Image (cartoon, grey):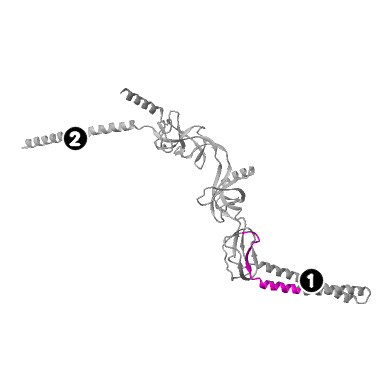
Amino acid sequence: MILVSAFLRSCRRHLVIAGLAPLVIALVGCGAKGGAGTAKGRKGGGPAPVVVGKAIRKVVPLEIEAIGTVETIRGANVRSQVTGVVQKIAIQEGQDVQAGDLLLEIDSRPFRNALRSSEADNEKIRVQLEYARGQVARYRTLSSDSMVSKEQFQKIQDDARALEAQSMVSESAVANAKLQLEYSSIRAPLSGRSGNINVREGDLVRANEAGIALLTINQLSPINVTFGVPQQYLSEINRYRTKATLAVKAVPPGLDPAPEIGELSFVDNTVDPATGTIRLKATFPNSSHRLWPGQFSTISITLTAPEVLAIPASAVQTSQTGQHVFVVREDKTAERREVVVERSLRGDAVISKGLKEGEVVVTEGQLRVMPGGALEIRSANGELAPGGEGKAKSKSKTKEKEKEKKT
C-alpha cells in the first residue's frame, strides 16, 4: 500500500513539471525578443536635436540694478499766512502752475481797511514832523541870537527827533499792512503740478495753521530718483565717477519698457550700517512726466561699456564641478567644456575663460546631449538648419540612397 502511494506521488510530480515546461520556454522567448527590441531601439537613437549660438565679441555694459523711489527736487505745502475766508479758488486740482500764479484769494477787505488806517496815521505823523522841523529851524536862529534859552531849544529838537522815530514806526505799520493785503492773494511759490485742494470757497482759514496744507505743489521736471546699492559697489562707483558722469536708466511701472535716461547726481557720505547699502540719487529731465513723486522704479546705473566675449546665457549649464557649455565640433559632435562666467546681463553671459571667439555652443536641447555624441542643429522654430547634420549621419544617408538606386 505504501509503495503504491509513493508511485502515485512521483507520477503527479512529473506531470506538473511537464506542464510548466512550455510556459518557461515561452517566457524565455519573450525575454529574448524584448532584449532584441531594446538593442534595436538604442542602435537607432540618432543625433540630439539642438539649437546653437556663437561666441562673439560685443559691447555688454557693466551695470548695477536696484529699485528706486521717485522724489521731487522742490515741493511746497501751501498754507495761508493770514486769517480770513476763502473768496476764490483760481486753479483746478492737478493743474500745472508757474511761480507767482494766483492760487487762492482770501477776503481782502479787512486788510485794505487796516492799510488805509495805517496810511492815515502815517500821514498825521508826517505833518507833525514837518511842523517840528520848521520849529527847529526857527528856534535855531533865535538861539544863536540868545533870544531863547538853550534848554528850550533842546526840547524842540528832542520833540522833532521823537516824531521822526514815530514816523519810521508808522511807515513800518503801513508796509506790514500792505504785506498782509498781499498775503490775502495766495500765489504759487514755485513752478510745478498742483495736488488736491483741501479747502473750498467760503471756508475759514487761519494763519500758519498746523495740520493739512491748503494744497501741495511738486516740481516734476527735472526730478530725482533715490536708490540704494550694496556697499561693495561703492569703490567701483567712485572710480568710474571720477572719469565721467555715470548714466542711469529708470523704467517706471507700466506697459512702456523704454527707460528714462538721467545721470548720477549724488552719493551719500555714509553707508547705512543696518542694511549695508549706500544711498544714491539720479536726476532725470522727465520731460514726458513718466516719473512721478513717490513712485517705485527699476534703476540700472551703467559704470562702463567694454567690448567682451559673450554667448547666450541659456548656453551655460551648472553642475557640481562648476559651470560648463557644450561646444559644437566641426564634425557636429558635442564637447563638454568648463567656462568661467564673469557676469550676465539681459540674456548675455560674459565669458572670461574657456571659450574663443567664433566657437559655436549649444543653447537649447542640452538634456539630450552627451559628450562626444552626434548633434543635429536646428533653428529656433525647430526646422533643420543648413548643414546641421553630422558627417556620420550624412554618410549613412548617402549609402541608403545608393542601395535604393541599385535595387
Disc 1 designates what residue? 165
Image quarter in which the N terminus is found: top left
Nearest to the observer: residue 277 or residue 74: 74
Bin the neighbour count of mark 2 within 10 Å (Cα to Cα): few under 14, some 14-19, many 20 and up.
few
Question: Does 38 sit left or right of 108 as displayed?
Answer: left
Residue 133: say if magenta: no
Amino acid at pointer 1:
Ala
Residue 107: say if magenta: yes
Q: Residue furthest left?
A: 1
- Give the vertical position of 139 relative to 221 (above or below): below
Nearest to the observer: residue 74 or residue 12: 74
Which residue sits at x=33%, y=24%? 405
Residue 374 spot, x, y in % from top left? 40, 31
Give me the C-alpha separation between circle 1 and circle 2: 135 Å
Q: Residue furthest right?
A: 145
Q: Earlier in the sequence, mark 1 or mark 2?
A: 2
Question: Does 116 sit left or right of 318 as displayed?
Answer: right
Give the magenta-colored segment's residue range: 97-121
Question: Does 96 sit left or right of 370 as displayed?
Answer: right
Q: Residue furthest top?
A: 406
Find numbered disc 1 in the image and state the secondary structure of the residue it sits on.
helix
Residue 399 spot, x, y in % from top left? 35, 24
Amino acid at pointer 2:
Leu
Disc 2 designates what residue? 23
Q: Quadrant of residue 202?
A: bottom right
- Give the vertical position of 46 relative to 407 (above or below): below
Kindly indicate whether the residue at mark 2 contacts the one at mark 1 (C-beta within 8 angstroms): no
Q: Mark 1, mark 2: which one is toward the viewer?
A: 1
